[in-house]
Amino acid sequence: MLKIDTGDTAWLLVSTAFVFLMIMPGLALFYGGLVRKKNVLSTIMYSFAALILISVEWVLVGYSLSFGPDKFGLIGDLSWIGLSGIGGSPNPDYAATIPALVFVAFQMMFAIITPAIISGSIAERMRFNAFALFILFWAVVAYNPVAHWVWGVGGWIRELGALDFAGGTVVHILSGVSALVAALVLGKRKRVGKEQFVPHNIPMVVIGTGLLWFGWFGFNAGSALSANGLAAYAFINTNTAAAAGALAWLLVEWSHYGKPTSVGAASGAVAGLVAITPAAGFVTPLASIIIGLIGGALCYNSVALLKAKLGYDDALDAFGIHGIGGTWGAVATGLFATTTINEAGANGLFYGDGSLLTKQLIAVAATYAMAAVSTFLILKLVSLIVPLRASQEEEEAGLDQSLHGEEGYRDYSLGVTDPSYSSKYNQLKVPEQEGYSSTS
């Protein structure tokens, strides 16, 4: 009979909470600070929507489709619908020392953050109801199958022998390529190319980055599924690659523009974190430096040069950082992986086995294809139900006010002039009491 290890269980519970912090408020603040102030709340709401909707979807069908008994190497069946049969005992197929429900919760956080990443590409122009429908369909059609391919027992990519320690293909390539397709389908924001769009709150971006970096320790080191030496390698590799990514981005940016920026440092750190994710539990700390440095430089050039040359409007560079960074990370795993770090892994090209690199490239290509086709079809389906994009008038006014009836920054001491706010504001006013005046 399997015995639960309390140390492993505690570590995975903490790691789950770490990844939750990545979503809310980490990613929400990171993305929210990068947009114009009239769209800060609508951008945060995309992450909130992913948290709300996918939390329910995962319990109902998502976990069963992703990790349930295999069907043809492509998808899990619905044996565990509503988490039927999943309880406090371990599932030896995935984690033999922790309760199955803890593994469910940990993987749920990955399922939530992946569609939230996509929102960076369509910020400031996609309607909230359309985004909500899109991510629900996308979770079932795209995320759940690819999670099964890569991590599910019997999944064809897992059986192939390709490696993805914590989500380079499942999370970052899948979301990054989907983000690019979504940006192309929706089209450019109004006035892109005619005026400069700059982040409205850079301190918010930096705070969000810090929370992402912190949470990423749970994302990667938690994927060891045990409080052991492998988790230690994943932890140190995560931090090292993030620092190297930030350093590379700053150096290239400094050379290109003449000044290092805090937004650049934040973007480079995220690029390094993305790049190390698939390799974190398979490579040495020295390799993590190389992976982070190349990841930071590649993502910078994707954002600063490739996007401008090709002319697509990936608003917050979800593809440039997650798609490109995740691709490099998957390839780097095929180069730098070594069984001296993880006996359950494989040796990469630089350790004498070039076959792993081939397997990684196959996994990358399959994920690109799945992301591109499924995202395009789902967006077309959603467009038949509700409009995908806000109107020109709504976009000009800002999605916070036009779609949500709120503003991120408002000085109520100046009074309320917008009729749509007056009734809500009056309801929320503090009643005048002795010693208090609403004008004081």
Image (cartoon, rainbow, N blue to C red):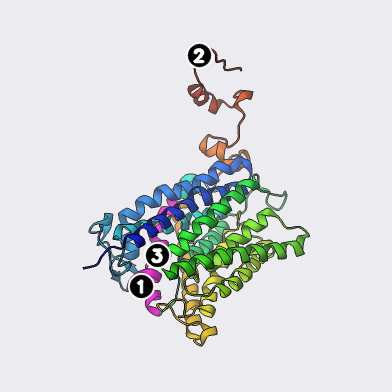
Residue flagged by tag 2: what amino acid is it? Answer: Gln
Magenta-highlighted residues: 133-160
Q: Can residue 138 be seen in this view?
A: no
Q: Do the residues labelled 2 and 1 touch (CB within 8 Å)?
A: no
Q: Which of 430 and 186 is in front in this view?
A: 430
User: From what the image shows, is residue 355 above or below residue 72?
Assistant: below
Q: Residues within 10 Å of mark 2 (few under 14, many from 20)?
A: few
Q: Nearer the viewer, residue 209 or 81?
A: 209
Q: Distance between the residues labelled 1 and 3?
A: 26 Å
Residue under label 3, please give it: 227
**Callout 1 secondary element:** loop
Residue 90 image point, x, y percent: 27, 63
| Percent position of residue 7, x then y | 35, 61
| Badge nearest the viewer, 2 or 1 | 2
Amino acid found under the numbered disc labelled 1: Gly
Q: Residue 155 carries which label?
A: 1
Say left or right for 34 vs 224: right
| Residue 137 magenta | yes
Q: How far apart are marks 2 and 1 (CA)?
A: 66 Å
Residue at x 22% of width, y 59% of height:
85
Report the residue at 46% width, 73% height from top. 366
Which sits in the foreground, 100 or 157?
A: 100
Total tally of numbered discs in the picture: 3
Q: Which amino acid does label 3 sit on?
A: Ala
Q: Is residue 29 above or below residue 354?
A: above
Mark 2 highlights which residue? Answer: 433
